[in-house]
């Protein structure tokens, strides 16, 4: 039994979600191999080789892998799929784009966003916006699985796996990379941040989010938002935390002016410590909060910043 992890990377380094996926792969049992398909991605392959628990890194290098086009990456995974009992990828936009194609071509059912491995053929995944956990047992010859990174600790480094170059499949010709617009920020990336300060509809406007900036600065935090705040146009949609946004599990999550709709809770309730600030004492957010402050956020947040100073 051998598990293949499809690495998410930028050709220079691995994304943190790959480390969480390796942890899940190790729990599946057997050897763990990582596929690094990219262009001039030797540095990413070497980084993968240093992950503890990984026994082999497969490095496929070609220009048409440079931008992570799912059609090409899926074909590369399929070219070696027969050697594996499990094929895993992070449940990010990257992994969610690749693995359904792999599962369809293999004619197996994908198991999405697992948070626990009970046995090599049995997994747990959240359903109903995280309000229930489904236990899924698969009899497929190859288990194709996306892994919710918040459900698994990041794998340690210190490994010394062998890096093996493998032939790259031909360009599928089904898609072409045109351009990429990347949001630039001096703050930590939302899904990797250890501290997140999020605002909701209770902020009232986009300008009001500036009240949260000093707090985020003091804590070295990323900034997030509820879907209601995003839909209202207060902040960009890449700030959205929730079932239809980003799933996060930081050490500290501060929810300001967020009522706590079920869709938002699904995206952040695994945070280690949750602090809620809301003027409504009946707000659902308080049901998951470790600490709650009832009051006017425009008074409380500046006071909190002053205390931290």
Image (cartoon, rainbow, N blue to C red):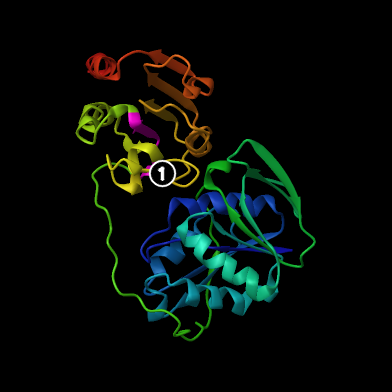
The quadrant holding residue 61 is bottom left
Is 196 included in the stretch rendered in magenta?
A: yes
Q: Which residue is mark 1?
A: 192
Quarter holding the C terminus? top left
Q: Determine the residue positioned at 64% across, 72% down.
A: 104
State left or right for residue 119 relative to residue 171: right
Q: Determine the residue positioned at 26% across, 28% down.
A: 212
Q: Position of residue 159 (x, y in %)?
A: 54, 55
Q: Position of residue 243 (x, y in %)?
A: 50, 43
Magenta extent: 189-201
Is 258 included in the stretch rendered in magenta?
A: no
In the image, residue 184 sits, relative to residue 67, either above or below, namely above
Q: Position of residue 145 (x, y in %)?
A: 63, 58
Q: Determine the residue positioned at 28% across, 58% down.
A: 182
Residue farthest along the right direction in this orientation: 139
Q: Secondary structure at mark 1?
A: helix
Quarter holding the N terminus? bottom right
Considering depth in this image, is 235 or 170 the residue closer to the camera? 235
Mark 1 Cα within 10 Å, few/some/many (few <14, many 20+)? some
State left or right for residue 268 relative to residue 128: left
Q: Position of residue 254 (x, y in %)?
A: 38, 27
In the image, residue 136 sits, relative to residue 223, either above or below, namely below
In the image, residue 120 sits, relative to residue 172, either above or below, namely above
Q: Can residue 240 be seen in the rendering of this structure? A: yes
Considering depth in this image, is 113 or 28 the residue closer to the camera? 113
Considering depth in this image, is 248 or 14 the residue closer to the camera? 248
Question: For the image shown, how many numbered marks are present on the structure?
Answer: 1
State left or right for residue 268 relative to residue 208: right
Residue farthest along the front direction in this orientation: 232
Considering depth in this image, is 164 or 118 the residue closer to the camera? 118
């Amino acid at each position: 039994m051998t598990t293949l992890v499809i690495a998410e990377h930028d050709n220079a380094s691995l994304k943190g979600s790959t480390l969480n996926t390796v942890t899940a792969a190790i729990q599946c049992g057997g050897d763990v191999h990582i596929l690094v398909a990219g262009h001039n991605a030797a540095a990413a392959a070497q980084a993968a080789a240093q992950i503890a628990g990984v026994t082999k890194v497969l490095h496929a290098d070609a220009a048409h892998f440079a931008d992570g086009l799912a059609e090409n990456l899926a074909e590369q995974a399929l070219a070696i799929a027969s050697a594996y009992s499990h094929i895993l990828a992070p449940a990010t936009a990257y992994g969610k784009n690749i693995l359904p194609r792999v599962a369809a071509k293999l004619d197996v059912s994908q198991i999405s966003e697992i948070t626990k491995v009970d046995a090599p053929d049995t997994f747990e995944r959240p359903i109903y916006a995280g309000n229930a956990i489904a236990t899924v047992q698969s009899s497929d010859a190859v288990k194709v699985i996306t892994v919710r990174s918040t459900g698994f600790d990041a794998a340690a480094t210190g490994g010394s796996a062998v890096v093996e170059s493998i032939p790259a499949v031909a360009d599928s010709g089904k898609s072409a990379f045109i351009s990429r617009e990347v949001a630039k920020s001096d703050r930590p990336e939302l899904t990797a941040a250890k501290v997140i300060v999020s605002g909701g509809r209770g902020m009232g406007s986009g300008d009001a989010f500036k009240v949260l900036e000093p707090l985020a600065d003091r804590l070295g935090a990323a900034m997030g938002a509820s879907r209601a705040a995003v839909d209202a146009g207060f902040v960009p949609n890449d700030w959205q935390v929730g079932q239809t946004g980003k799933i996060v599990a930081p050490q500290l999550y501060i929810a300001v002016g967020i009522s706590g709709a079920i869709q938002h809770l699904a995206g952040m309730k695994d945070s280690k410590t949750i602090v809620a600030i809301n003027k409504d004492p009946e707000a659902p957010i308080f049901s998951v909060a470790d600490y709650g402050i009832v009051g006017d956020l425009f008074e409380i947040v500046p006071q909190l910043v002053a205390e931290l100073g």
